[in-house]
Image (spheres, rainbow, N blue to C red):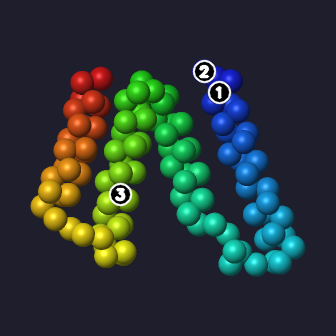
Amino acid sequence: MVIVGLLAAVLTTGSWIPQLVRVWRTRSTDDLSWGYLGTFASGVFLWLAQRDIALGTAYAVWTGIGAAGTFLVGIWFFGDAASLGRYLGVILIVGGVVTLKLAH
């Protein structure tokens, strides 16, 4: 398991090299991928969470937060439909994640 985590860390960190080269050449950070930075930070937090809780629980929490967050961003910023059924679905996802964590 340690080897998989190390490989993931090396590949994820290495994927920043093209962006760093572009910033270095253009002397501008305007072209940085902030979405990627958020994804990278999310992965780092998942890795940190796995130190204290089981992999399955950590991944379920990570995925649940991502699903609920994406749902809310879609409604607030992109005009996605906001119905009672959709909110209920997200509440069930979050409730399931909380139950997994409490049952651990």
Residue drawn at x 31%, y 63% is: 72
Residue 87 vertical placement versus 56 (above, below)? below
The image quarter containing residue 70 is: bottom left
Judged from the image, the secondary structure of the residue bearing numbered disc 3 is helix
Instruction: Please state, as top left, top right, bottom left or bottom right, where the N terminus lies in the image.
Output: top right
Cβ atoms under marks 1 and 3 closer than 8 Å: no
Residue drawn at x 67%, y 39% is: 9
Mark 3 surroundings within 10 Å by alpha-carbon count, few (fewer than 14), some (14 through 19), many (20 or more): few
Judged from the image, the secondary structure of the residue bearing numbered disc 1 is helix
Pinpoint residue 39: horizontal percent, then vertical percent: 55, 54
Tell me the number on the disc at residue 84.
none
The disc labelled 3 sits on which kind of residue? Answer: Gly
Instruction: Please state, as top left, top right, bottom left or bottom right, where the C terminus lies in the image.
Output: top left
The disc labelled 2 sits on which kind of residue? Answer: Met
Tell me the number on the disc at residue 1.
2
The image quarter containing residue 74 is: bottom left
Tell me the number on the disc at residue 4.
1
Judged from the image, the secondary structure of the residue bearing numbered disc 2 is loop
Q: CA distance from mark 1 to mark 2?
A: 5 Å
Residue pointed to by mark 3: 69
Cβ atoms under marks 1 and 2 closer than 8 Å: yes
Mark 2 surroundings within 10 Å by alpha-carbon count, few (fewer than 14), some (14 through 19), many (20 or more): few
